[in-house]
Image (cartoon, grey):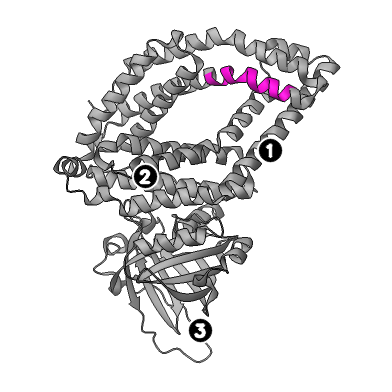
Amino acid sequence: MLNTELELKFAVSEADLTALSAHPALAGPRTEARLISSYFDTPLRALERAGLSLRLRREDGAWVQTLKGGYAPGDLARLEWRHRLVEPERRPGRARRPQPFRMALADTPAAPLIRGQRLRSVFTIDVTRAVQRYREDGAIIEVALDRGVLKAGSLKEPILELELERLSGDSAALFTLARSLANLAPLWPRLVSKADRGYALAAAAAQTGPSRRPARREWKALSQDPPTLEAFGAIAHHALAETTERLLDLRARRGADTLHQMRVSLRRLDAALQLFGPAVRDGEWAHVRAAGRDLAQRLDAAREMHVFLRQVSRGCGPGLRRSEEARAAREARAALLRAIRRMRAAALDEALASFDAPGASKGVMAILSWLDDAAWNRTHDATRRARQTLALSAFIAPRLQRLRRRVLAVGDKLEGLSPSARHKLRLKVKRLRYAAIDTSAPFDRPGRTRRFLNALTQVQDALGDLNDLAATPKLAHAAAREAGTEGCFLAGRLAAEAIAREPAALKRAARAIRRLKDAEPFWV
């Protein structure tokens, strides 16, 4: 049986549940059941690569087989095919977990992928689900709390999630209820399914070494030339999903790379909103873009302190390295590093605290709601509708060309730019790079794409070095105040060296911009 599933899932903590229990949607009587699910795939993960998942779950005393599709681009709805298995008679004393029933998959997208292939269990999910129903704005919503564990090989990952599923009525009611709950506790949507997380855990279980961790979900480039609207939905949805997953990881591990990846995801979302603006701009577009930028800005100070700590840890110029030969200089450097680490920890604490505030999770909810049910998706404007249905390559080529011209026009004046103007140029370069990564596949020019992206990366890195040098005096003086008299001398030296290194860094950036000018665009 083919159904359409529309749901919102949120990662929660025990403290969140305590706060949320005051809401009537979680205060009523619940029914509980233990659900043990096994997920199957071919040896080469054909279903995973196609964005499908095949599950066998014990429900109400019977086995139910469910094939799920991935999230539709920019949509929270997913297709699913359910089939209740009829179990053969079993010999007394012998329990048996059935294999997937292939006949039930005959008319599904999985059929050609599994033909002639063995199916084996890849991971299992064992949860206790507490369920109740709630009425919101005329819609009936199932409110479920899953508590349990995901298992793959020798690895386990805890599960504690709140799920809202629309059973009937308008999908807008899901967001109305979610926003109401977010007034009580910070709710962060999980746009990566349990199946995706299970596959990531299975991949980590297959690795060797002590530090096995689920890999970051990679962007699956658009392999065809989809309509513009579909491409935008896929790109924006992936960027938002990566943002929320990285935040959960940042809370758990406080890693610098995770912080960086979260900022990158938010920048990619902003780049997509700007690039596809002519096709999707409506009355809410500016507010949605502002919400994404606000989330990114909450991370800026922590990222800036991490980069500064890395600079000082590696040494900043030959003079500083020579001065470290003296014991006093080594002690001063150690004091300065301790001060910078304290400042970085404080900046990260402040960022995480800001994400626990209601405004942050509501901002994510606003973006997600807009992507799912925006007016731009139902526009009657003929010009905008024509842009939305245009093939991605035809829509995006002139946009990329215009952005490239702007980058090169400003880059030609690099030596006369102020530090703030150079930073704005770097943001344009990032926007062009993210757009190129996300939209290059339909042009099918891998060599030209690789050379163009390499040239862009060199410009971005060179401008990043200039930005770091410009920020060094301010950060060094702040670190000196934190370190006290021990670190004052080295902080001053750091600031002086940063100023002295700027001319050479400017020359490197100018060379990188000339190489970008010579790199042939992949879209022409």
The reply to whether residue 194 is in sight is no
* Residue that badge 3 annotates: 95
Q: Earlier in the sequence, mark 3 or mark 1?
A: 3
Dot 1 alpha-carbon crowd within 10 angstroms: few under 14, some 14 to 19, many 20 or more:
some
Q: Residue shown at 44%/23% (left/top)? A: 424
Q: Earlier in the sequence, mark 2 or mark 1?
A: 2
Q: Position of residue 180 (x, y in %)?
A: 48, 61
> Mark 2 to mark 1: distance in Å?
31 Å
Nearest the camera: 179 or 127? 179
Q: Position of residue 52 (x, y in %)?
A: 36, 59
Dot 2 alpha-carbon crowd within 10 angstroms: few under 14, some 14 to 19, many 20 or more:
many
Dot 3 alpha-carbon crowd within 10 angstroms: few under 14, some 14 to 19, many 20 or more:
few
Q: Residue furthest right?
A: 327
Q: Position of residue 92 (x, y in %)?
A: 50, 92
* Residue that badge 2 annotates: 236
Check disc 2 and report its element: helix, strand or loop: helix
Relative to 512, residue 378 above or below? below
Q: Position of residue 80 (x, y in %)?
A: 33, 67
The reply to whether residue 368 is in sight is yes
Q: Residue shown at 48%/13% (left/top)? A: 418
* Residue that badge 1 annotates: 345
Residue numbers of the magenta segment: 467-480
Quarter of the figure that contains the C terminus: top left
